[in-house]
Amino acid sequence: MAGVLYLVSTPIGNLADITARAAAVLEDVSVCYAEDTRRTGRLLAHLGHDVSLRSLHAHNEAARVSEIVRRLKSGEDCALVTDAGTPAVSDPGRRVVQALHDHDLRVVPVPGASAVLTALTVSGLPADRFLFLGFAPRRGPARAEWIAQVRASPDTVVVFESPRRLEQLLVHLTEAGLAERPCVLCRELTKLHEEVTRGTIAELREESAGKTIRGEVTMVIAAAKRDTEPDGEVLEQAARELARSGASTRDIVDRLCDEFGVSRNRAYEVGLRVESGNHA
Protein backbone atom coordinates (compact mmCIF):
# COMPACT_ATOMS: atom_id res chain seq x y z
CA MET A 1 0.00 0.00 0.00
CA ALA A 2 1.07 3.56 -0.65
CA GLY A 3 2.07 5.72 2.28
CA VAL A 4 0.44 8.89 3.59
CA LEU A 5 1.65 12.47 3.83
CA TYR A 6 0.49 14.05 7.08
CA LEU A 7 0.20 17.84 7.13
CA VAL A 8 1.00 18.47 10.78
CA SER A 9 0.14 21.78 12.41
CA THR A 10 2.75 22.75 14.99
CA PRO A 11 2.65 25.26 17.87
CA ILE A 12 2.88 28.94 16.97
CA GLY A 13 4.99 29.59 20.05
CA ASN A 14 4.27 27.55 23.15
CA LEU A 15 5.48 23.98 22.58
CA ALA A 16 2.88 22.72 25.07
CA ASP A 17 0.24 23.48 22.43
CA ILE A 18 1.25 20.45 20.35
CA THR A 19 -1.71 18.07 20.11
CA ALA A 20 -1.52 14.46 21.23
CA ARG A 21 -2.34 13.33 17.70
CA ALA A 22 0.37 15.50 16.15
CA ALA A 23 2.92 14.16 18.63
CA ALA A 24 1.94 10.57 17.81
CA VAL A 25 2.15 11.17 14.04
CA LEU A 26 5.59 12.77 14.34
CA GLU A 27 6.79 9.73 16.26
CA ASP A 28 5.50 7.19 13.76
CA VAL A 29 6.46 8.63 10.34
CA SER A 30 9.57 7.57 8.46
CA VAL A 31 10.66 11.12 7.70
CA CYS A 32 9.56 14.63 8.58
CA TYR A 33 9.92 17.40 6.01
CA ALA A 34 10.42 20.74 7.73
CA GLU A 35 10.68 24.38 6.69
CA ASP A 36 13.54 24.83 9.18
CA THR A 37 15.10 21.56 10.36
CA ARG A 38 16.80 23.24 13.33
CA ARG A 39 13.53 24.66 14.63
CA THR A 40 11.65 21.42 14.08
CA GLY A 41 14.56 19.54 15.64
CA ARG A 42 13.94 21.45 18.87
CA LEU A 43 10.26 20.48 18.77
CA LEU A 44 11.12 16.81 18.20
CA ALA A 45 13.65 16.94 21.04
CA HIS A 46 10.94 18.41 23.28
CA LEU A 47 8.73 15.45 22.36
CA GLY A 48 11.55 12.95 22.79
CA HIS A 49 11.25 11.77 19.19
CA ASP A 50 14.14 10.66 16.99
CA VAL A 51 12.81 11.16 13.46
CA SER A 52 14.73 11.69 10.23
CA LEU A 53 14.47 15.33 9.10
CA ARG A 54 14.59 16.71 5.57
CA SER A 55 14.31 20.36 4.62
CA LEU A 56 11.37 21.63 2.57
CA HIS A 57 11.13 25.37 2.21
CA ALA A 58 10.08 27.97 -0.35
CA HIS A 59 13.28 27.55 -2.37
CA ASN A 60 13.37 23.76 -2.67
CA GLU A 61 9.73 22.70 -2.46
CA ALA A 62 9.41 21.97 -6.17
CA ALA A 63 12.56 19.83 -6.07
CA ARG A 64 11.25 17.80 -3.13
CA VAL A 65 7.99 16.78 -4.85
CA SER A 66 9.39 13.79 -6.75
CA GLU A 67 11.22 12.58 -3.65
CA ILE A 68 8.04 12.63 -1.55
CA VAL A 69 6.02 10.95 -4.31
CA ARG A 70 8.64 8.19 -4.49
CA ARG A 71 8.64 7.67 -0.72
CA LEU A 72 4.85 7.44 -0.53
CA LYS A 73 4.66 5.04 -3.49
CA SER A 74 7.18 2.81 -1.72
CA GLY A 75 4.89 2.67 1.32
CA GLU A 76 6.54 5.19 3.63
CA ASP A 77 4.48 7.58 5.74
CA CYS A 78 5.84 11.14 5.86
CA ALA A 79 5.03 14.33 7.72
CA LEU A 80 5.25 17.92 6.54
CA VAL A 81 5.57 20.77 9.04
CA THR A 82 6.41 24.45 8.80
CA ASP A 83 8.06 26.70 11.37
CA ALA A 84 4.75 27.33 13.11
CA GLY A 85 1.09 26.76 12.36
CA THR A 86 -0.27 24.89 9.36
CA PRO A 87 1.58 23.92 6.16
CA ALA A 88 0.44 25.67 2.96
CA VAL A 89 -1.14 28.61 4.86
CA SER A 90 1.27 31.45 4.03
CA ASP A 91 3.93 28.72 4.23
CA PRO A 92 5.34 26.02 1.93
CA GLY A 93 3.26 22.95 1.18
CA ARG A 94 0.74 23.76 -1.54
CA ARG A 95 2.86 22.43 -4.43
CA VAL A 96 3.46 19.15 -2.65
CA VAL A 97 -0.21 18.70 -1.79
CA GLN A 98 -1.29 19.44 -5.36
CA ALA A 99 1.26 17.01 -6.76
CA LEU A 100 0.12 14.23 -4.44
CA HIS A 101 -3.50 14.79 -5.44
CA ASP A 102 -2.40 14.54 -9.08
CA HIS A 103 -0.76 11.17 -8.28
CA ASP A 104 -3.83 9.95 -6.34
CA LEU A 105 -1.75 9.75 -3.16
CA ARG A 106 -3.29 10.31 0.24
CA VAL A 107 -2.85 13.57 2.17
CA VAL A 108 -4.13 13.74 5.76
CA PRO A 109 -4.43 16.99 7.76
CA VAL A 110 -3.48 16.97 11.43
CA PRO A 111 -4.89 20.28 12.71
CA GLY A 112 -3.60 22.32 15.60
CA ALA A 113 -2.57 25.83 16.56
CA SER A 114 -3.36 28.68 14.15
CA ALA A 115 -2.12 32.26 14.45
CA VAL A 116 -5.09 33.41 12.37
CA LEU A 117 -7.74 31.89 14.62
CA THR A 118 -5.85 32.68 17.82
CA ALA A 119 -5.64 36.36 16.88
CA LEU A 120 -9.28 36.49 15.81
CA THR A 121 -10.53 35.03 19.08
CA VAL A 122 -8.54 37.47 21.22
CA SER A 123 -9.26 40.53 19.04
CA GLY A 124 -12.88 41.02 20.05
CA LEU A 125 -13.74 41.86 16.43
CA PRO A 126 -16.44 39.92 14.52
CA ALA A 127 -15.11 36.50 13.54
CA ASP A 128 -18.13 34.84 11.93
CA ARG A 129 -16.77 36.00 8.56
CA PHE A 130 -13.23 37.17 7.86
CA LEU A 131 -10.74 37.75 5.05
CA PHE A 132 -7.22 36.39 5.47
CA LEU A 133 -4.67 38.20 3.30
CA GLY A 134 -1.39 36.76 4.55
CA PHE A 135 1.70 38.95 4.23
CA ALA A 136 1.56 42.28 2.43
CA PRO A 137 3.46 42.44 -0.88
CA ARG A 138 6.63 44.48 -0.45
CA ARG A 139 6.04 47.16 -3.09
CA GLY A 140 4.43 48.31 -6.31
CA PRO A 141 0.94 47.71 -7.72
CA ALA A 142 0.59 44.41 -5.83
CA ARG A 143 0.99 46.23 -2.51
CA ALA A 144 -1.46 48.97 -3.52
CA GLU A 145 -4.03 46.35 -4.56
CA TRP A 146 -3.51 44.47 -1.29
CA ILE A 147 -4.10 47.63 0.76
CA ALA A 148 -7.20 48.39 -1.33
CA GLN A 149 -8.58 44.96 -0.37
CA VAL A 150 -8.02 45.73 3.31
CA ARG A 151 -9.74 49.10 2.94
CA ALA A 152 -12.78 47.77 1.10
CA SER A 153 -13.36 44.46 2.87
CA PRO A 154 -16.87 44.16 4.35
CA ASP A 155 -15.47 41.55 6.74
CA THR A 156 -12.81 41.53 9.45
CA VAL A 157 -9.33 41.24 7.90
CA VAL A 158 -6.44 39.17 9.29
CA VAL A 159 -2.90 39.74 8.03
CA PHE A 160 0.65 38.74 8.92
CA GLU A 161 3.58 41.11 9.00
CA SER A 162 7.27 40.99 9.80
CA PRO A 163 8.24 43.06 12.86
CA ARG A 164 10.78 44.91 10.72
CA ARG A 165 8.09 46.05 8.28
CA LEU A 166 5.24 46.68 10.70
CA GLU A 167 5.77 50.42 11.10
CA GLN A 168 5.92 50.94 7.33
CA LEU A 169 2.69 48.99 6.84
CA LEU A 170 0.92 51.08 9.47
CA VAL A 171 2.14 54.23 7.70
CA HIS A 172 0.85 53.01 4.34
CA LEU A 173 -2.51 51.97 5.80
CA THR A 174 -2.83 55.42 7.39
CA GLU A 175 -2.00 57.12 4.11
CA ALA A 176 -4.66 54.98 2.41
CA GLY A 177 -7.36 56.51 4.58
CA LEU A 178 -7.50 53.86 7.30
CA ALA A 179 -6.21 56.01 10.17
CA GLU A 180 -9.41 55.62 12.21
CA ARG A 181 -10.00 51.94 11.43
CA PRO A 182 -9.94 49.81 14.63
CA CYS A 183 -7.09 47.32 14.68
CA VAL A 184 -5.61 44.73 17.04
CA LEU A 185 -1.90 43.91 16.97
CA CYS A 186 -1.02 40.46 18.28
CA ARG A 187 2.66 39.81 18.91
CA GLU A 188 4.41 36.69 20.19
CA LEU A 189 1.10 34.84 20.56
CA THR A 190 1.21 31.96 23.10
CA LYS A 191 4.78 32.88 24.12
CA LEU A 192 6.13 34.32 27.37
CA HIS A 193 6.04 37.90 26.09
CA GLU A 194 2.67 37.68 24.35
CA GLU A 195 1.25 41.13 23.65
CA VAL A 196 -2.17 42.16 22.35
CA THR A 197 -2.57 45.88 21.62
CA ARG A 198 -5.81 47.56 20.55
CA GLY A 199 -6.45 50.94 18.99
CA THR A 200 -6.98 52.70 15.70
CA ILE A 201 -4.37 52.24 13.01
CA ALA A 202 -3.21 55.81 13.61
CA GLU A 203 -2.82 55.15 17.35
CA LEU A 204 -0.92 51.93 16.77
CA ARG A 205 1.30 53.66 14.23
CA GLU A 206 2.17 56.36 16.76
CA GLU A 207 2.80 53.80 19.48
CA SER A 208 5.13 51.69 17.34
CA ALA A 209 7.07 54.59 15.80
CA GLY A 210 10.79 54.17 16.33
CA LYS A 211 10.40 51.04 18.45
CA THR A 212 12.23 47.78 17.89
CA ILE A 213 9.49 45.19 17.45
CA ARG A 214 10.36 41.55 18.03
CA GLY A 215 8.41 38.44 17.10
CA GLU A 216 6.00 37.77 14.28
CA VAL A 217 2.92 39.98 14.20
CA THR A 218 -0.67 39.08 13.37
CA MET A 219 -2.97 42.04 12.71
CA VAL A 220 -6.75 41.94 12.93
CA ILE A 221 -8.37 44.92 11.20
CA ALA A 222 -12.02 45.92 11.47
CA ALA A 223 -14.27 45.67 8.42
CA ALA A 224 -15.14 48.69 6.33
CA LYS A 225 -18.26 50.48 7.49
CA ARG A 226 -21.21 50.08 5.17
CA ASP A 227 -22.17 53.21 3.27
CA THR A 228 -25.88 52.61 3.83
CA GLU A 229 -27.76 50.85 6.58
CA PRO A 230 -30.31 48.14 5.75
CA ASP A 231 -33.96 49.08 5.94
CA GLY A 232 -36.02 48.43 9.06
CA GLU A 233 -37.77 45.35 7.68
CA VAL A 234 -34.44 43.57 7.12
CA LEU A 235 -33.27 44.46 10.63
CA GLU A 236 -36.52 43.38 12.25
CA GLN A 237 -36.53 40.08 10.40
CA ALA A 238 -32.98 39.36 11.59
CA ALA A 239 -33.92 40.40 15.13
CA ARG A 240 -37.01 38.15 15.14
CA GLU A 241 -34.96 35.16 14.01
CA LEU A 242 -32.43 35.81 16.76
CA ALA A 243 -35.21 36.19 19.34
CA ARG A 244 -36.76 32.88 18.24
CA SER A 245 -33.40 31.20 18.79
CA GLY A 246 -33.40 32.43 22.39
CA ALA A 247 -31.11 35.46 22.04
CA SER A 248 -31.50 38.19 24.65
CA THR A 249 -32.13 41.80 23.65
CA ARG A 250 -28.50 42.56 24.39
CA ASP A 251 -27.34 39.68 22.19
CA ILE A 252 -29.64 40.88 19.40
CA VAL A 253 -28.22 44.39 19.63
CA ASP A 254 -24.64 43.10 19.48
CA ARG A 255 -25.40 40.93 16.44
CA LEU A 256 -27.20 43.71 14.56
CA CYS A 257 -24.27 46.06 15.16
CA ASP A 258 -21.70 43.47 14.08
CA GLU A 259 -23.51 42.06 11.05
CA PHE A 260 -25.25 45.15 9.68
CA GLY A 261 -23.03 47.98 10.89
CA VAL A 262 -25.91 49.89 12.44
CA SER A 263 -25.55 52.19 15.43
CA ARG A 264 -26.28 50.77 18.88
CA ASN A 265 -29.16 53.22 19.28
CA ARG A 266 -30.89 51.92 16.16
CA ALA A 267 -30.14 48.32 17.09
CA TYR A 268 -31.71 48.89 20.52
CA GLU A 269 -34.80 50.41 18.93
CA VAL A 270 -35.24 47.34 16.72
CA GLY A 271 -34.45 44.93 19.56
CA LEU A 272 -36.94 46.54 21.93
CA ARG A 273 -39.62 46.68 19.23
CA VAL A 274 -39.21 42.96 18.54
CA GLU A 275 -39.21 42.19 22.29
CA SER A 276 -42.41 44.17 22.87
CA GLY A 277 -44.03 42.43 19.90
CA ASN A 278 -43.16 39.05 21.37
CA HIS A 279 -44.80 40.00 24.66
CA ALA A 280 -47.91 41.51 23.05
Image: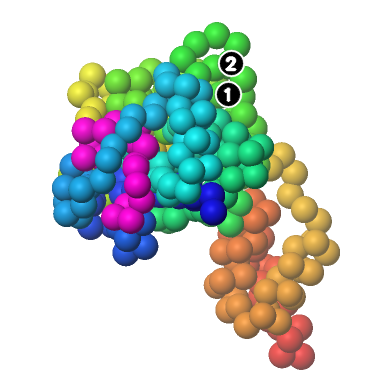
Callout 1 touching callout 2 (CB < 8 Å): yes
Q: Amino acid at mark 2?
A: Ala
Q: Residue at x 50, y 35 (%)?
A: 70
Q: Is residue 200 visible?
A: no
**Residue at x 43% of width, y 47% of height:** 76
Q: Among all residues in the image, which is located at the extreme bottom? A: 280
**Magenta-highlighted residues:** 26-41
Return the residue at label 2.
142
Above or below for 134 versus 74:
above
Which quadrant of the view contains residue 256?
bottom right
Quarter holding the N terminus is bottom right
In the picture provided, is 228 more to the left or to the right than 37? right
In this picture, residue 2 sits left or right of residue 228:
left
Residue 158 lies in magenta, yes or no?
A: no
Image x and y of residue 48, in percent: 17, 54
Q: Please name the residue shown 34% across and 42% down the image.
A: 32
Tell me, yes or no, whether the highlighted magenta stretch contains residue 28: yes
Judging by the rendered image, the residue that carries numbered circle 1 is: 146
